Image (cartoon, rainbow, N blue to C red):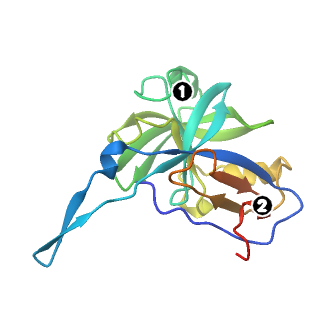
Amino acid sequence: MITNLLVLLLVVGASSTTYPLVCRRDPEEDKLQHLTLSSETYPVKPLFAIFTLAMAIEGIPYELAVDTGSADLFVKGENMTGNPVKKLSCSTCLQNNRKASILYLDGEVQTYLYLANVGIGNHSFPQFILVAYQANTSNFDSMGGILGLSFPKLAVNENPGFMSTLINNKIIKRNMFGIKLSFKKPNTSFITFGGFDKSLLAPNA
């Protein structure tokens, strides 16, 4: 579902903002497995991780998985299981009765369109997001939703996406982001919107 994260290292604009990411790994994914190719079996140890970003939707804290392979921001509604405990009420989502289906590699998520107050760090702004009320996959149980950062043409939601909303609200100036990831060390993964943080680059990188 979560594709390989693409790190965009571009010339930074005057305005950018950096937030911590949390690496969430399933211990079951770290167990030694076996891969068969051309009748030969090889031991492999897969490396799988989801990196989440802390955000607030209508004042409710959500941990959203950062995904560069999709372009929609969706969060779980009240009738969906798993993280978080408190979720948006889908009764309020019905005010416009607009629905959308997002297809990921491992399943489909049914959503409502909802105008929400989105908060990240010290910033908050209104944005049309998608609120999930049903999913035919269990892979979303450990997260509150997904923050898609891919090309806008891939989005199901036709309204301005997260990056465009940051620009429209003058939080950042450029449509770019940089990511530093660490799979083992806590508190060493970050995402920067509007550019990249030079202090997070290795020397002579």
Q: Can you say whether 63 is above or below 11 in the image?
A: above
- Asked if one can make out residue 182 in the rendered structure from this viewpoint, the answer is yes
Q: Quadrant of residue 138?
A: top left
- Placement of the C terminus among the 4 image quadrants: bottom right
The quarter of the picture where residue 55 lies is top right
Q: Which residue is mark 2?
A: 199
In this view, the residue in front, 143 or 59, is: 143
Q: Quadrant of residue 92?
A: top right
On the picture, is 40 further left or further right than 189?
A: left
Task: Please say if 188 is above or below 12.
Answer: above
**Closer mark to the observer between disc 2 and disc 1:** 2
Label 1: which secondary element: loop
Q: Residue furthest left?
A: 39
Q: Residue at x 38, y 43 (%)?
A: 26
103 left or right, relative to 160: left
Q: Earlier in the sequence, mark 2 or mark 1?
A: 1
Which residue in the structure is indicated by mark 1?
94
Q: Amino acid at mark 2?
A: Ser
* Residue at the (72%, 55%) spot, across then down: 192
